[in-house]
Image (cartoon, helix red, strand yellow):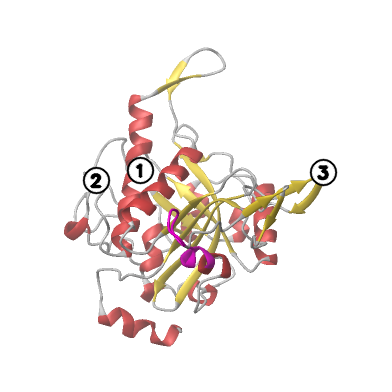
């Protein structure tokens, strides 16, 4: 993947790559089940998340993107000498993204993969999600689901087809068909000038997160592709059943943990110092809300579409 020229290109490309990877795993890889049968393999969500962090770091290397995988002493909270020093959030990924100048979102996300055999997102746990929601509220974060999809029904009418790829599973974005892939799509999955890759999507409705099952028909109304984060003009639409708009959740500056990561010196430089340092089991200078398996910071670098008109449209939101 070449360096991205702007944020929407970056998000579109990693979404396409995530879906392609899921499709290739399902099509070309087998796994053995507990009954010693060979079945089509499903790509684990941990693999997709690790790939996503790597691809965003690599594809966004000219955009100021910071990608971080946590070492074991920092992943998922911390216990020292049998005492819980930092309660884990249970999140797979924390994402700070600036979608327009001075419009930041601070997400705490649980990742789940779509399973074609059952038509739901596997291991969607209301109990786990409710813990995430409570933790996020306490630490002023936005809880949500980061969803990994496949090239199967209901994303298409028939597995493997492209002509009917309309992605009608999305209801939370009025601009689902606005993405201009013909200008910068760097993948074989450019199914026309108005298609979303649909490989990565999100759901921020806390009531839906706390219920089961996680079938696409249940979450459709507030389900959106990840590129929607860049669709500023539609941010006033409600993203949950309580009527909350995405704009209401924004902030003018990056959260503290993201600012620290942006300001940290690169490894190998003379000023490089560990963002975290473990000394006798006690981390030093560790933000109390740094509790996810991976962290991503994406500062604004243009979205490649509206230019000055985008800047004008965001004035009232700041």
Given residues 73 and 189, the one toward you in this image is: 73
The mark that comes first in sequence, 2 or 1, is: 1
Given residues 268 and 195, the one toward you in this image is: 268
Q: Residue 155: x, y in percent?
A: 36, 45
- Measured in 3D between alpha carbons, the distance from the residue under mark 2 to the one under mark 3, in whole angstroms, is 50 Å
Queried whether the magenta region covers residue 249, the answer comes back as: no
Circle on res. 189: 2
Q: Is residue 198 in sight in this rendering?
A: no
The mark that comes first in sequence, 3 or 1, is: 1
Mark 1 lies on residue: 19
**Residue 236, placed above or below residue 274:** below
Q: Is residue 74 in sight in this rendering?
A: yes
Near mark 3 (Cα within 10 A), the count class, few <14, some 14-19 or many ≥20, is few
Near mark 2 (Cα within 10 A), the count class, few <14, some 14-19 or many ≥20, is some
**Residue 216, placed above or below residue 307:** above
Q: Residue 153: x, y in percent?
A: 37, 40
Given residues 249 and 298, the one toward you in this image is: 298
Q: Disc 2, disc 1: CB below 8 Å?
A: yes
Please tell me which residue is depicted at 28% across the width and 35% down the height of the picture.
Answer: 160
The kind of secondary structure element at disc 1 is: helix
Queried whether the magenta region covers residue 265, the answer comes back as: yes
Q: Disc 3, disc 1: CB below 8 Å?
A: no
Give the dominant element type of the magenta stretch: helix, strand or loop: loop
Location of residue 156 by image quarter? top left
Q: Which residues are magenta?
A: 260-270
The mark that comes first in sequence, 2 or 3, is: 3
Q: Residue 318: x, y in percent?
A: 46, 84
Please tell me which residue is depicted at 52% across the width and 19% down the height of the picture.
Answer: 33
Which is closer to the viewer, label 3 or label 1?
3
Mark 3 lies on residue: 82
Circle on res. 62: none
The kind of secondary structure element at disc 3 is: loop
């Amino acid at each position: 993947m070449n360096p991205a020229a702007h944020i929407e290109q970056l998000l579109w490309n990693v979404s396409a790559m995530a879906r392609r990877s899921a499709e290739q795993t399902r099509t070309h890889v087998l796994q053995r089940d507990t009954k010693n049968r060979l079945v089509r393999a499903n790509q684990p969500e941990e693999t997709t998340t690790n790939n996503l962090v790597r691809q965003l770091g690599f594809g966004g290397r000219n955009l100021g993107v910071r990608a971080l995988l946590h070492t074991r002493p920092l992943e998922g909270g911390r216990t020292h000498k049998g005492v819980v020093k930092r309660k884990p959030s249970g999140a797979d990924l924390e994402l700070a993204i600036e979608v327009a100048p001075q419009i930041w979102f601070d997400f705490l996300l649980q990742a789940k993969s779509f399973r074609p055999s059952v038509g739901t997102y596997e291991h969607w746990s209301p109990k786990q999600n409710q813990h995430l929601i409570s933790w996020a509220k306490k630490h002023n974060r936005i809880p949500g689901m980061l969803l990994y999809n496949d090239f199967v029904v209901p994303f298409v009418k028939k597995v493997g087809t492209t002509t009917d790829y309309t992605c009608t599973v999305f209801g939370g974005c009025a601009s689902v068909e606005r993405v201009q892939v013909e200008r910068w799509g760097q993948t074989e999955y450019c199914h026309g000038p108005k298609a979303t890759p649909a490989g990565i999507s999100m759901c921020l409705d806390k009531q839906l997160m706390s219920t089961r099952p996680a079938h696409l028909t249940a979450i459709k109304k507030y389900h959106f592709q990840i590129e929607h984060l860049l669709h500023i003009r539609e941010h006033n639409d409600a993203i949950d059943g309580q009527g909350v708009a995405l704009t209401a959740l924004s902030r003018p500056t990056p959260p503290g943990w993201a600012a620290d990561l942006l300001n940290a010196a690169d490894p190998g430089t003379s000023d490089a110092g560990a963002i975290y340092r473990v000394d006798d089991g006690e981390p030093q200078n560790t933000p109390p809300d740094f509790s996810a398996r991976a962290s991503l910071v994406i500062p604004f670098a243009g979205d490649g579409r509206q230019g000055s008109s985008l800047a004008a449209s965001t004035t009232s939101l700041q």
